[in-house]
Amino acid sequence: MNFALTEEQEAVRKMLRSFVDKEIIPYIQEWDANWHFETSIMKRLAELDLMGVCIPEQYGGAGMDYNTLAIVCEELERGDTAFRTAVSVHTGLNSMTLLQWGNEFQKEKYLVPQAKGEKIGAFGLTEPNAGSDVAAMQTTARRDGDEYIINGSKTWISLCDVADHFLIFAKTDKDKGHHGISCFIVERTYPGVSTKAIKGKLGIRAGNTGEVFLEEVRVPAENMLGDEGEGFKIAMSALDNGRFTVAAGACGLINASLEASVKYCHERKTFGKEIGKHQLVQQMIAKMSSNLEISRLLVYRAGWLKNEGKRNTRETSLAKWIACDAAFEAASDAVQVHGAYGYSNEYPVERFLRNAKAPVIYEGTREIHTIMQAEYALGYRSDKALRQMLPSWPFEEE
Ligand SMILES: Cc1cc2nc3c(=O)[nH]c(=O)nc-3n(C[C@H](O)[C@H](O)[C@H](O)COP(=O)(O)OP(=O)(O)OC[C@H]3O[C@@H](n4cnc5c(N)ncnc54)[C@H](O)[C@@H]3O)c2cc1C
């Protein structure tokens, strides 16, 4: 067992930390206040070769391991959840799914430009009446010659207004429940695709989230990812990667909450001493610090399983559940440590608290992960190898 980061991973962490300190933290309060998604950050990440950090070089990526993706996500969310969400969706949910399930044509056409950051990918699973209950989706795809015609709508889709490509899940057979869902690569430019941002969100205000409408959208049959009826399995395997990035990002939010709280503990005095000297304040700091360690270990174990090419649904779900709950608690305690000042946007911790809520809801709510963990423990659920597995790391050149 080796717990040390490699020199390459340390270098990525250092580079990202300095990038976030210089190019995100000084501006984020203004972007958040103005509901502004700064797309240049994604361009800068592409210049740093980080939009496809764990995609093989042969498909335009940086060819690094899956835990390097975790490091990227942790450091980005130390700046703001919006940019980590962007990488979660573009790399975790979309590009890694193309890597796992795509054929050579699909990888060349869609994965390569996404890994280089020239095109942006999004993930359309949730619908107005189907979130946790994926099989309740109403979007349909019907075959017409060499095409499928998609009708329906998706909601709460991150990057909806900026994405070039969407993975869209639709029912190809309404009578088959989970087995009747298929996955399609849909380009924004296809006639009948339109998007609209959701306003009034609690948090991630510096990010873009919204609806995708699909009206008689003709998609070439060659854009079906995997086989007809394989969409549910593809969606769940995509979530194994998305959830991994969300868990890693949660570590960054815990770290940001801890850093801000430690700083304030040394600045603020009550009853003649720094507040950090009061034991009840120390209890909150101790919780943040220990939860950061616990969450990171769970994330890195899931990343190690990915590197080994093994199923990791159980371990990734555990990391996501524990880290996101811990991040929400850390952000809430960070506001508490700051007292009334924490309740205003003079300090960043109120934004941390608002941002920390969405990851407890998306990519499997806290309740869904609780049930999953109970089902594994009770023997009601187990994982078998999938028809297509994410490639192990180091990647083999083909
Ligand atoms: C900021 C943000 C970004 C998002 N980005 C994306 C994206 O890019 N792509 C995408 O497809 N989706 C995205 N989502 C949607 C997200 O994945 C869903 O909101 C999530 O899956 C939950 O679905 P729901 O909101 O419909 O809640 P519901 O499924 O309606 O759940 C409502 C409540 O009931 C509970 N519940 C439901 N079923 C059970 C059960 N069996 N047992 C116990 N409790 C249960 C839930 O835990 C929750 O508390 C995003 C959401 C947010 C907030």
Image (spheres, rainbow, N blue to C red):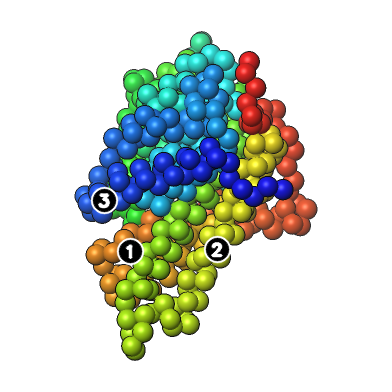
> Which tag, 3 or 2, sits closer to the chain's start?
3
Q: Nearer the viewer, residue 340 or 387?
A: 340
Residue furthest top in the image: 145
Identify the element where label 3 is drawn. Answer: helix
Q: 219 or 334, which is in the foreground?
A: 334
Specify whether tag 3 is near ligand 1 (CB below 8 Å). no
- Of the residues under marks 2 and 1, which one precedes in the sequence? 2
Of the 4 image quadrants, the one containing the C terminus is top right
- Marks 2 and 1 sit apart, C-alpha to C-alpha, by 20 Å
Please give the name of the residue rendered at 48% of the width and 82% of the height, measured from the top-left corner. Answer: 279
Q: Which residue is mark 1?
A: 350
Circle 1 SS class: helix
Disc 3 marks which residue? 26
Coordinates of residue 13 in the picture (x, y in percent): 47, 44
Please identify the quarter of the rendering in which residue 102 is found. Answer: top right
Residue occupying the point 65% across, 22% down: 396
x then y, percent, for residue 261: 39, 68
What amino acid type is highlighted by mark number 1? Answer: Glu
Disc 1 Cβ-to-ligand 1 distance below 8 Å = no
Q: Which residue is mark 2?
A: 291
Mark 1 or mark 3, earlier in chain? 3
Is disc 3 surrounded by few (<14), some (14 to 19) or many (20+) residues within 10 Å?
A: few
Kindly identify the amino acid type of the residue bearing the numbered disc 3. Answer: Pro
